C-alpha cells in the first residue's frame, strides 16, 4: 500500500519544483524486460566470470570474445520498449528537469526524454576501437571486429577500469546543483561515483526515493516511498 499522505507530499513537491533531477538505475528498466546485468555471471571457456570481470577494459582487449558473448547475451535487448516510468520521467524532464541514469539501454531517449545524461554511456553508441568508425547494433550483432582493420568493436559504455566521461560527470553535478527536488528510483545507489552525486545537492533540496527497497545509505531528511515504482509514477 502506498501511503496517501506521502504521495500527496510528493505531488506537491513536483508541482512546486523549479527544477527536478531524477537519478535512476536498473530497477526502472527491469519492467521493460531488461535484466540487471550486475546479477548475471558469464561462462567463458568453462570458467564462470563475474560481470565486473567481464565488463572490464581488460576483458575487452584481452578476451574480446568473452566480452562480446556477455554483452550480446545479457545486455542488448534491442526490441525492449520504454515503460510507464521512463515515459513519466520523460514528460517531467522535458517540462522542467534532467535525468541522470546509470542505465545504458537507451530507453529514456526512446521515451522521448530530451534531458538525459547517460552517466555510464550508451550501448548503442558502437564504434571500432582502432579507427573510431561507428556501427549499428545490427552490424555489431554480426561481427565483433571491424573487417577493414580487424579492430575490436565496442559499445560506448563505461567499463570497469575506465573513468566516467568528464563531460557527463560535470553535467550531472550541474543538474543536481540546480535542482530543488531530487527523485531517485530503481537504484540501490551503491555504485561509485554515481552515488556521490547526491552530495552536490542544495542544502534545502527535497530528496525522494521511489524504490522497492530502501537505499543502502539513506540520508536522514530523505522521504521514501517503498513500493513498485510503476504504481507511484502512475499516480503522479
Ligand atoms: Zn576500424
Image: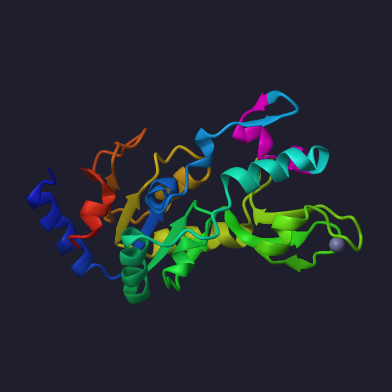
- Work out whether residue 234 can be spotted: yes
72 left or right, relative to 196:
right
Residue closest to the eye, 18 or 58: 58
Residue closest to the eye, 60 or 169: 60
Residue 227 image-quadrant placement: top left
Range of residues picked out in magenta: 48-60
Q: Identify which residue is drawn at 17% across, 60% down.
A: 235
What is the quadrant of the N terminus in the image?
A: top left
> Horizontal and vertical percent for residue 109?
48, 68
Residue lying furthest bottom in this view? 95
Whether residue 70 appears in magenta in the rendering, the answer is: no
Residue closest to the eye, 179 or 52: 52
Q: Is residue 42 above or below residue 210?
A: above
Q: Identify which residue is drawn at 74% across, 67% down.
A: 134
Residue lying furthest right in this view? 149
> Horizontal and vertical percent for residue 76?
58, 52
193 left or right, relative to 140:
left
203 left or right, relative to 163:
left
- Work out whether residue 208 can be spotted: no
Amino acid at each position: 500500500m502506498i501511503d496517501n499522505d506521502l504521495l500527496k507530499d510528493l505531488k506537491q513537491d513536483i508541482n512546486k519544483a523549479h527544477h527536478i533531477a531524477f537519478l535512476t538505475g536498473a530497477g526502472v528498466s527491469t519492467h521493460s524486460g531488461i535484466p540487471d546485468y550486475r546479477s548475471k555471471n558469464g561462462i567463458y571457456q568453462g570458467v564462470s566470470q563475474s560481470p565486473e570481470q567481464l565488463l572490464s577494459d581488460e576483458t575487452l582487449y584481452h578476451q574480446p570474445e568473452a566480452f562480446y558473448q556477455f554483452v550480446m547475451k545479457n545486455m542488448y535487448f534491442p526490441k525492449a520498449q520504454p515503460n510507464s516510468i521512463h515515459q513519466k520521467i520523460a514528460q517531467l524532464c522535458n517540462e522542467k528537469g534532467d535525468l541522470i541514469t546509470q542505465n545504458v539501454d537507451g530507453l529514456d531517449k526512446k521515451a522521448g526524454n530530451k534531458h538525459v545524461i547517460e552517466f555510464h554511456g550508451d550501448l548503442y553508441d558502437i564504434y571500432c576501437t582502432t579507427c573510431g568508425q561507428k556501427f549499428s547494433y545490427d552490424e555489431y550483432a554480426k561481427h565483433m571486429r571491424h573487417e577493414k582493420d580487424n579492430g575490436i568493436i565496442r559499445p560506448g559504455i563505461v567499463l570497469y577500469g575506465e573513468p566516467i566521461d568528464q563531460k557527463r560527470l560535470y553535467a550531472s553535478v550541474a543538474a543536481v546543483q540546480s535542482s530543488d527536488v531530487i527523485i531517485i528510483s530503481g537504484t540501490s545507489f551503491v555504485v561509485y561515483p554515481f552515488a556521490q552525486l547526491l552530495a552536490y545537492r542544495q542544502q534545502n533540496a527535497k530528496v525522494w526515493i521511489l524504490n522497492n527497497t530502501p537505499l543502502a545509505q539513506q540520508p536522514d531528511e530523505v522521504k521514501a516511498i517503498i513500493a513498485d515504482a510503476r504504481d507511484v509514477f502512475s499516480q503522479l
